[in-house]
Image: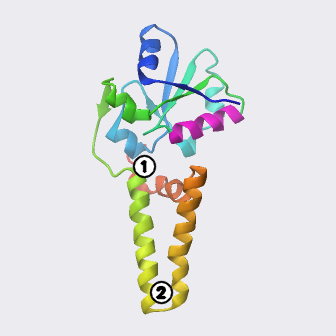
Amino acid sequence: MELKTIEPQELQALMGSGQSIQLIDVRTPAEFEEIHAAPARNVPLDRLDPEQFRSARGDRLFLICKSGARGLQGCEKLANRGIECVTNLTGGTDAWNKAGLPVVRGRKTISLERQVRIAAGALSLTGAILSLSVHPYFAGIPAFVGAGLFFAGVTDTCGMALILARMPWNQRGA
């Protein structure tokens, strides 16, 4: 099944034509609070339940994230459970904002992607130092992190991001 995508300007035109749509932002509440497309409502990817959209048969459903990757994951999740009227916004909130479309801005936060880089770097550095100063077995920590990053790159699914998204500081505004 091929997933549908739409450009920000096309979606804005659809909204202006009076069509019934739902724009769902699948980022963490903290990311959503920082900046989001004005008509969007927040349903984080890890809480995206296809059952909550079954009753919206007349509405067209659009998913948005930061740049498009999590939106596609959400579209796949919904499409695999029979929700076929779902479309991903190409380029996500970054593209929406760049197109000059209306956004709501709130408190600045550290993006999930940046949190992953910080955590991966800290774990790798700690493991390397411990392997040199305490025991060579600690070299397994940076090896494990490297394997996780490789897996994330190949599959476009990051386990560390899924864990970090559930941390309390990313639940602000939920």
* Residue type at numbered disc 1: Gln
Q: Residue at x 46, y 92 (%)?
A: 134
Per the image, label 1 sits on a secondary structure element best described as: loop
Task: Report the residue marked by disc 2.
Answer: 131
Let me know if residue 161 is in the magenta part.
no
User: How far from the left and from the top, in percent, is residue 108?
Assistant: 28, 46
Task: Report the residue marked by disc 1.
Answer: 171
Q: Residue at x 44, y 86 (%)?
A: 130
The residue nearer to you, when weighing 67 against 111, is 67
Mark 1 nearby-residue class (10 Å; few <14, some 14–19, many ≥20): some
**Magenta region, residue range:** 69-80
Quadrant of the rendering where the C terminus is positioned: top left
Quadrant of the rendering where the N terminus is positioned: top right
Q: Main secondary structure of the magenta part?
A: helix
Q: CA distance from mark 1 to mark 2?
A: 34 Å
Q: Residue furthest bottom?
A: 134
How many numbered marks, from 0 up?
2
* Residue type at numbered disc 2: Ser
Q: Residue furthest top?
A: 17
User: How far from the left and from the top, in percent, is residue 50?
Assistant: 65, 34
Q: How was this image coloured?
A: rainbow
Q: Residue at x 45, y 45 (%)?
A: 28
User: How far from the left and from the top, in percent, is residue 13?
Assistant: 43, 13
Q: Name the side, left or right, on which 170 lies relative to 48.
A: left
